[in-house]
């Protein structure tokens, strides 16, 4: 992959090329030597995007390249071909065009699903099902005069009325739409946002910031009781890197930029942020700040709160920002922390200064198979105490379908850790050895680079799998928590069991998939993901059942010392637990901030509080 | 009120037909907990000794005492050595072989509900299991293991009192059949507690074996259920509350003996003849016992109770989130009240599935019969009446309906001929066994009589839980100044409070108990209850009289104790001298004919009364240098005495018998 990139004149370029190939390794087909994650450009412009491309990854009419009722690109999806074999369509990903015979068997045996029983989605958005917009004419007039583009088109509005929670996608597939924004507006810079917010305050219009739309907390859902005009502020056109400061290793970036674009543009200059949430193809910088996002390489690079140096946000009271870019300040509570995780309730994040790092010189995948989950977790813990920040993005997945047999290991209990080492070559190799030595102490066997790489590749396509399930009566979702080390195994066992039991009690006819993985590690604990899916044949209201089970699972998480969320946020989905999570006084503090910053509830998405 | 209960299967029947040896050597492959990682006894000890919990306490103790941590660790190891079971299948087989010989000579049958066994088997697979048998006899725990072995179920490890250890060989044998030994009291000993609780939790969490213990703490000498002890229950619930296991199944087991091996032994003990120390030779003296007929045993494995569902909505498990789980903490108030309520619930579940034999009804009736000899026909008629009442109240009564009632009665009397002597078809007034020698002095005669009465009472007590709530209501109506509903309720509440050390009455459930009593008595046509009033019906008199008389000995007992405290108690009354002093006072009262019920001589009743008075603040304890003295609040005790004796309780009897 990297070989066909011509030797750059400078070191920086060489590193950049390397970096590209790595990302491509995540996302792209191997035989496709070109840079293709900014796929829209390839298609729309029909040419290779060159390094200084100013092309836009995300068009205003997103529905042209992205599914309106499912995950990701329109051209990319899992499907069963005529032979009944699973394949992944399109050209964008490494998996694209591949046939996966094992998937069907896994799918059928795990869920009791059958290719005979289909539940196809309704084909096109039904514009007549969308309520006509509630328009504040005076606002529209004033907005027109600013020249900022906007739309009242039903498709545009429906697209921005949801995130990617199961209930949201399920409803869309059935052609059901509830309250949707009345207008979509596309600011192209900070000043546009200032104008929009001013007008909204003047005319009492409700604003909902919209970044990548990948929210999984019902954060983007329009409150049905909202009677004012709801305007979706789509930040996608604010996507430039405004400057890079190589002395201080920072970059100043517009908040609407999506992850893959940010990495691509920085890579061109030999840098990266290292912030790689699984949703990075579509989620935006502003969205990360607004939800306190976390990437899989956070062990090296940090979470979003560690990565931001400066944030600019437009609120109904005006612009909030710090006066300098000092790396740390003791100036009372950090005002960034009112913004981080504010979930669009206080204002629009418009520009962010982020830490950047030179791209790693060397990168190596790896994987370890453990006889069971317990040993795997113990190993991760040990790796962390011995050599911190060695590798990032390890994921521990018990019972995954891509490794089924391993000598001497019980296939029902074995567990895989995928590894990615980054840094200079020597250190990477040294660390690699250390990690495998530790793993061996816990009965772990090195399972090769391939399995590691495949693990990563799957990270990006896994969301597509859910859509496949939904074509065949299978619904599911993942949810996460963070928990101290000593409770990791307990919480995993109890939550999985709770899910299984709740499903049974609620009449789910087939045993559910209930599994988990450790995705992030800290000195004091870990982030744990739960995957939960089931075959809903025979249920009259599957989504309701799903929600009840997820609710019970969340109760179980909290009872076992887990947090309400490690990085997905609260939104409206987890609001009911906020008070017990942050205490009554804590709620009061948050409320008083909201009351001061936004007394008219202009940012009225009603998340969090 | 009719509860559905399982059928029984006699497990001795097969033993009578085929080889005991083959049975004892049978292939034994029990199903185990699905999450089990098997481990040897030595590994278990290491797990305990190396646990974070124990480490923490060892360091703590070492800091407090100045001893080196290694020395404390040594101590811990020694404690564990003294405590731990060493289960061996060969010993279990030996017991199985011996026990089936013994059982076959002692008992007519050992009946087990097989559905319960199936439920248990399921429960063992799903989650760690705690077995909670009732405790009426030494036999209990051997019997339990015997049954589980018979049905190929996982053998339990059993918390046993240290006193067994006195019997050298037997103690070790028991250890090898799964018993572990705990000291009777280790109140302040942190290290001991830590080793003990960690030992139990380790076994439980890992599902190594079902953990068995007696909720009542000790054998009930009166056959009444005892107020549950919370220590071990707290320990076994902890792994669930702290999320270390998904759930725990608690299985109440009711063991009912038609005739208790220790029957007169208990009575003597209650009367103050000290109990013989459990010694091997003592056990062998019990060989005499082997020649007698002890009827049948019924063992009912109750519905497994999920600790998770018990705790649902009652305990906020988040309370354990903020401190490391290995640091020992006193249970919070809500955990304490949860465990307490659960304990009562479980004891009631044991009670509910206790099988009552016809003799229990006869004993109840005989104890109320003070005035004249009864002829057997009359007794039979009353027993049939009581049988029907019992059934209406949902009792688990085993009355053989296919046998003519007169035969049922006479065979019951025959089995218990040690307690009642029938001459010419007449049953003498009040129980009178062969122990009553006409030649003895009056006090000795009284005590001999009391042995028989207390033995009979222990059978009546088996049925107490059936009648308790209605009986409290009947007595409440009696002491209430009017039939006003509120007044009756107040009296009920007073009595319930007074007797909450005596009977199993769940704390805080006054209203439910009252309603339950009202419901039963209205349903059976005994009472009419309006908005304002609680009225007895004409046909209800017989029941009311029976119920009131059932309570009488207790009311009178408490009343006499109050009387004693007001009239006789000196300043120097101590906790130690209380029982002998009360007993002396009561003997005098009984001999002078001012007191009717010999039953009040039971030290159990006396202790419970004292506990109640202390709880109510009518008596205060002051700890002195070497003894604890009791200070009496005379005003309060006086008023309690008055309330208990509001009306002469005797008159009802005459109403009925005339
Ligand atoms: C398949 C999949 C994988 C995911 N993986 C990860 C992961 O690895 N790590 C992780 O952290 N999350 C992950 N998420 C969740 C989601 O991607 C994150 O919450 C992300 O930060 C949301 O960004 P977005 O740009 O899509 O925001 P949106 O979904 O558009 O919005 C989310 C919230 O932020 C507000 N918001 C958006 N932009 C702004 C702005 N500029 N100013 C103010 N408020 C704004 C919105 O009003 C809304 O309340 C995943 C989601 C999916 C569906």
Image (spheres, rainbow, N blue to C red):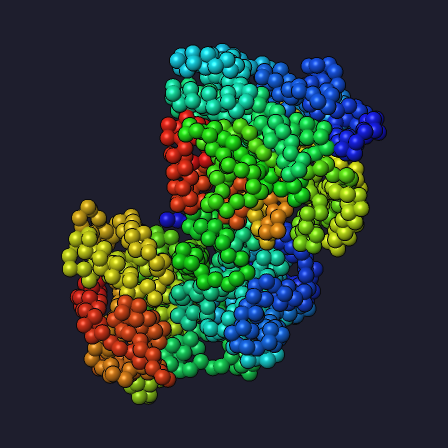
Horizontal side of B25 relative to A222 (left or right) equals: right
Residue ID at (50%, 73%): B189
Name the image quarter holding residue B438: bottom left
- Asked if one can make out residue A486 in the rendered structure from this viewpoint, the answer is yes
Q: Is residue A570 above or below residue A229?
A: below
The mark total stands at 0
Position of A53 with respect to B339 (left or right) is right
Residue located 19% across and 46% down the image: B531
Q: Would you say B277 lies left or right of B538 here?
A: right
Ligand 1 in which quarter: top right
Q: Position of residue B91 (x, y in %)?
A: 66, 70
- x then y, percent, for residue A36: 73, 23
Tell which of A551 and B309 is nearer to you: A551
Give the camera-side residue of A205 and B536.
A205
- The residue located at (75%, 45%) in the rendering is A368
Q: In this view, does B538 lie above or below B135?
A: above
Q: In which quarter of the image is the N terminus of chain A?
A: top right
Q: Residue A118: where, in percent of width, then height?
A: 63, 22
Residue in the image at 38% along x and 19% along y:
A203
Image position, residue A27 (x, y; %): 72, 29
**Quarter of the image holding residue B404?**
bottom left
Which is nearer the eye, A242 or B280?
A242
Residue B583, above or below A200: below
Q: Is residue A140 left or right of residue B85?
A: left
Image quarter of residue A299: top right
């Amino acid at each position: 992959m990297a070989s066909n990139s011509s030797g750059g004149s400078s070191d920086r370029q060489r590193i950049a090329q390397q970096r590209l190939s790595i990302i491509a390794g995540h996302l792209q087909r191997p035989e496709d030597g070109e840079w293709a994650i900014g796929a829209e450009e390839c298609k729309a412009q029909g040419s290779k995007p060159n390094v200084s491309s100013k092309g836009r990854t995300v068009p205003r009419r997103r529905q042209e390249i992205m599914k309106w009722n499912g995950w990701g690109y329109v051209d990319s999806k899992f499907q069963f071909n005529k032979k009944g074999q699973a394949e992944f369509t399109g050209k964008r990903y490494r998996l694209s065009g591949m046939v996966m015979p094992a998937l069907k068997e896994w799918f059928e045996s795990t869920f009791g699903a059958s290719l005979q029983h289909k539940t196809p989605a309704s084909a096109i958005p039904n514009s007549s099902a969308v309520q006509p917009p509630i328009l504040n004419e005076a606002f529209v007039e004033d907005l027109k005069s600013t020249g900022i583009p906007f739309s009242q088109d039903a498709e545009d509005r429906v697209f921005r009325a949801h995130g990617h929670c199961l209930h949201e996608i399920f409803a869309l597939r059935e052609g059901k739409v509830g309250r949707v924004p009345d207008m979509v507006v596309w600011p192209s810079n900070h000043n546009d946002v200032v104008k929009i917010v001013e007008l909204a305050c003047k005319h009492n219009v409700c604003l909902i910031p919209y970044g990548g739309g990948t929210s999984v907390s019902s954060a983007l859902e329009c409150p049905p009781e909202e009677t004012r005009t709801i305007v979706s502020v789509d930040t996608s056109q604010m996507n430039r890197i405004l400057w890079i400061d190589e002395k201080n290793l920072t970059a100043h970036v517009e908040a609407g930029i999506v992850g893959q674009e940010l990495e691509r543009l920085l890579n061109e200059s030999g840098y990266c942020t290292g912030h790689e949430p699984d949703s990075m193809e579509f989620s935006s910088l502003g969205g990360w700040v607004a939800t306190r996002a976390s990437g899989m390489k956070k062990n090296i690079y940090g979470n979003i709160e560690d990565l931001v140096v400066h944030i600019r946000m437009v609120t109904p009271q005006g612009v909030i920002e710090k006066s300098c870019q000092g790396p740390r300040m003791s100036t009372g509570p950090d005002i960034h922390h009112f913004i981080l995780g504010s979930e669009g309730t206080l204002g629009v994040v418009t520009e962010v200064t982020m830490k950047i790092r030179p791209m790693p010189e060397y990168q190596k995948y790896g994987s370890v198979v453990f006889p069971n989950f317990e040993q795997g977790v113990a190993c991760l813990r040990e790796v962390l105490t011995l050599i911190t920040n060695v590798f990032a993005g390890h994921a521990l997945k018990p019972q995954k379908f891509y490794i089924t047999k391993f000598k001497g290991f019980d296939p029902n209990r074995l567990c895989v850790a995928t590894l990615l080492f980054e840094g200079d070559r020597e250190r990477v190799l040294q660390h690699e050895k250390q990690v495998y030595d530790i793993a061996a102490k816990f009965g772990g066997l090195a399972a090769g680079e391939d399995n590691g790489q495949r693990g990563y590749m799957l990270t990006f396509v896994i969301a597509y799998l859910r859509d496949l399930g939904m074509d065949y009566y299978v619904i599911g979702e993942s949810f996460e928590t963070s928990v101290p080390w000593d409770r990791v195994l307990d919480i995993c066992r109890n939550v999985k069991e709770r899910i299984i039991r709740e499903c049974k009690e609620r009449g789910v006819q087939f045993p559910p998939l209930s599994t988990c993985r450790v995705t992030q590690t800290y000195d004091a604990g870990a982030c744990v993901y739960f995957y939960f899916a089931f075959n809903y044949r025979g249920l009259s209201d599957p989504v309701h059942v799903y929600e009840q089970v997820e609710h019970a699972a969340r109760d179980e998480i909290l009872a076992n010392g887990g947090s309400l969320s490690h990085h997905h946020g609260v939104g409206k989905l987890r609001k009911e637990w906020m008070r017990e999570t942050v205490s009554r006084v804590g709620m009061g503090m948050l409320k008083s901030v909201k009351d001061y910053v936004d007394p008219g509830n202009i940012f009225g998405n009603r998340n969090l509080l | 009120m009719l509860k559905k209960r399982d059928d029984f299967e006699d497990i001795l029947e097969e033993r009578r037909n085929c080889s005991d040896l083959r049975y004892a050597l049978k292939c034994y492959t029990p199903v185990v907990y699905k999450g089990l990682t098997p481990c040897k006894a030595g590994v278990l000890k290491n797990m305990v000794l190396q646990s974070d919990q124990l480490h923490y306490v060892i360091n703590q103790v070492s800091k407090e005492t100045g001893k080196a941590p290694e020395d404390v660790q040594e101590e811990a190891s020694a404690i564990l050595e003294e405590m731990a079971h060493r289960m061996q299948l060969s010993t279990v087989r030996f017991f199985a072989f011996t026990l089936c010989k013994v059982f076959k000579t002692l008992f007519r049958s050992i009946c087990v509900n097989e559905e319960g066994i199936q439920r248990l088997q399921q429960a063992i697979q799903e989650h760690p299991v705690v077995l909670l048998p009732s405790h009426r006899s030494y036999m209990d725990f051997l019997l339990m293991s015997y049954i589980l072995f018979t049905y190929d179920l996982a053998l339990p490890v059993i918390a046993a009192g240290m006193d067994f250890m006195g019997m050298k060989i037997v103690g070790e044998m028991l250890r090898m059949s799964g018993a572990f030994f705990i000291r009777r009291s280790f109140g302040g000993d942190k290290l001991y507690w830590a080793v003990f609780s960690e030992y139990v939790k380790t076994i439980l969490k890992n599902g190594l074996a079902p953990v068995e213990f007696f909720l009542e703490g000790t054998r009930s000498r009166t056959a009444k259920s005892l107020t549950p002890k919370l220590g071990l229950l707290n320990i076994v619930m902890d792994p669930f509350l702290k999320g270390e296991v998904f759930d725990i199944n608690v299985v109440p087991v009711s063991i009912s003996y038609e005739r208790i091996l220790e029957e007169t032994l208990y009575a003597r003990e209650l009367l103050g003849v000290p109990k013989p120390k459990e010694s091997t030779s003592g056990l062998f003296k019990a060989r005499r016992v082997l020649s007698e007929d002890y009827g049948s045993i019924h063992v009912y494995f109750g519905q497994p109770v999920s600790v998770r569902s018990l705790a649902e909505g009652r305990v906020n498990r988040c309370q354990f989130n903020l401190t490391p789980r290995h640091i020992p903490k006193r249970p919070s108030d809500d955990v304490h009240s949860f465990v307490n309520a659960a304990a009562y619930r479980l004891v009631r579940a044991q009670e509910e599935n206790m099988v009552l034999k016809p003799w229990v009804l006869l004993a109840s009736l005989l104890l109320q019969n003070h005035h004249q000899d009864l002829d057997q026909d009359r007794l039979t008629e009353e027993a049939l009446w009581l049988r029907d009442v019992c059934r209406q109240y949902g009792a688990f009564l085993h009355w053989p309906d296919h046998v003519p009632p007169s035969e049922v009665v006479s065979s019951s009397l025959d089995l218990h001929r040690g307690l009642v002597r029938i001459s010419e078809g007449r049953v003498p007034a009040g129980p009178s066994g062969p122990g009553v020698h006409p030649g003895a002095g009056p006090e000795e005669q009284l005590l001999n009589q009391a042995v028989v009465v207390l033995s009979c009472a222990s059978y009546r007590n088996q049925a107490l839980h059936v009648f308790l709530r209605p009986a409290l209501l009947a007595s409440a109506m009696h002491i209430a100044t009017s039939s006003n509903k509120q007044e009756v309720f107040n009296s009920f509440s007073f009595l319930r409070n007074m007797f909450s050390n005596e009977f199993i009455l769940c704390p805080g459930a006054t209203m439910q108990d009252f309603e339950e009593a009202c419901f039963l008595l209205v349903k059976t046509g005994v009472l009419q209850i309006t908005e304002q009033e609680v009225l007895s019906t004409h046909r209800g008199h017989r029941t009311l009289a029976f119920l009131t008389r059932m309570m009488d000995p207790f009311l009178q007992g408490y009343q006499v104790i109050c009387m004693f405290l007001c009239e006789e108690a000196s300043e120097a009354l101590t906790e130690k001298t209380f029982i002998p002093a009360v007993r002396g006072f009561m003997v005098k009262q009984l001999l002078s004919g001012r007191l009717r019920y010999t039953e009040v001589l039971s030290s159990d009743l006396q202790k419970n009364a004292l506990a109640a008075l202390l709880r109510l603040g009518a008596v205060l304890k002051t700890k002195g240098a070497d003894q604890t003295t009791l200070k009496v609040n005379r005003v309060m005790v006086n008023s309690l005495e008055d309330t208990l004796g509001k009306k002469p309780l005797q008159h009802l009897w005459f109403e009925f018998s005339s």
